[in-house]
Image (spheres, rainbow, N blue to C red):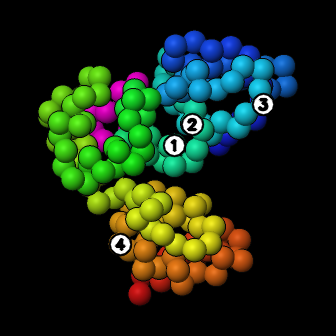
Amino acid sequence: MLNYIIGKVVFQENNSIVVENNNIGFTIFVANPFSFELDTEVKVYLYNQVKEDEYSLYGFKTLDERNLFLKLINVKGLGPKMAMPMLATGSISGIIDAIDRENILYLTKFPKIGEKLARQIILDLKGKLARKEDLDIAGDFDDLISVLESLGYKTAEIKKVVPKINASLDIEQQIKEALKLMLK
């Protein structure tokens, strides 16, 4: 799986950018293509979708944005082409807040998101998404928090365990320690 690409933005369209890396241009679907500056080197976090008739790259400026996207596309009936407009028109904290507060009206303002799908998003994701300000943990634990969220741990569980982890450990050791503490 591709994790990220570093390259120069050489072209923008209404829903994608082209990033040139080693004389190869990669078309990457992004939420806000015009937020990337042309002829500037960028780091874009990736999600690659492989279907029998299509290979697509979806790009994100931050890991938090990609993590929310990955959670959204795991909801039944919500694919990448529906999740990207959510990220384009809504803030990460706004979307998480709407899910946690069961704000169907906020979620249905996004294109192609009806009441039924909004209820499914809430059912699948309520309490499973963490905002950085909710965690308020000293140290650089962004990667560890992302891993624990992707494993399905809730904000409250993460909040209890992460402060007990030594920040000087490498990410693999942090994950091992966190999982040991989660199982106690």
The reply to whether the C-beta atoms of the residues labelled 4 and 3 are less than 8 Å apart is no
The reply to whether the C-beta atoms of the residues labelled 2 and 4 are less than 8 Å apart is no
Find disc 4 in the rendering and name its residue. Answer: 156
Q: Can I make out residue 50 in this image?
A: no
The reply to whether the C-beta atoms of the residues labelled 2 and 1 are less than 8 Å apart is yes
Helix, strand or loop: magenta stretch: loop
Give the CA separation, mark 2 to mark 4.
Answer: 26 Å
Q: Tell me the kind of residue under disc 1.
A: Arg
Q: Residue at x 27, y 32 (%)?
A: 77
State the quadrant of the C terminus: bottom left
Q: Tell me the kind of residue under disc 4.
A: Ala
Which badge, 2 or 3, is on the more N-terminal residue? 3
Which badge, 4 or 3, is on the more N-terminal residue? 3
Question: What segment carries the magenta color?
Answer: 73-82
Which badge, 1 or 3, is on the more N-terminal residue? 3
Give the CA separation, mark 4 to mark 1.
Answer: 21 Å
Q: Tell me the kind of residue under disc 2.
A: Phe
Which badge, 2 or 4, is on the more N-terminal residue? 2
Q: Seen in the image, is 40 located left or right of residue 47? A: right
167 to 125, vertically: above or below: below
Magenta-drawn stretch contains 77: yes
Q: Tell me the kind of residue under disc 3.
A: Glu
Q: Residue at x 44, y 29 (%)?
A: 88
**Residue 150: percent from the left, percent from the top?**
46, 57
- Classify mark 2: helix, strand or loop: strand
Find disc 3 in the rendering and name its residue. Answer: 41
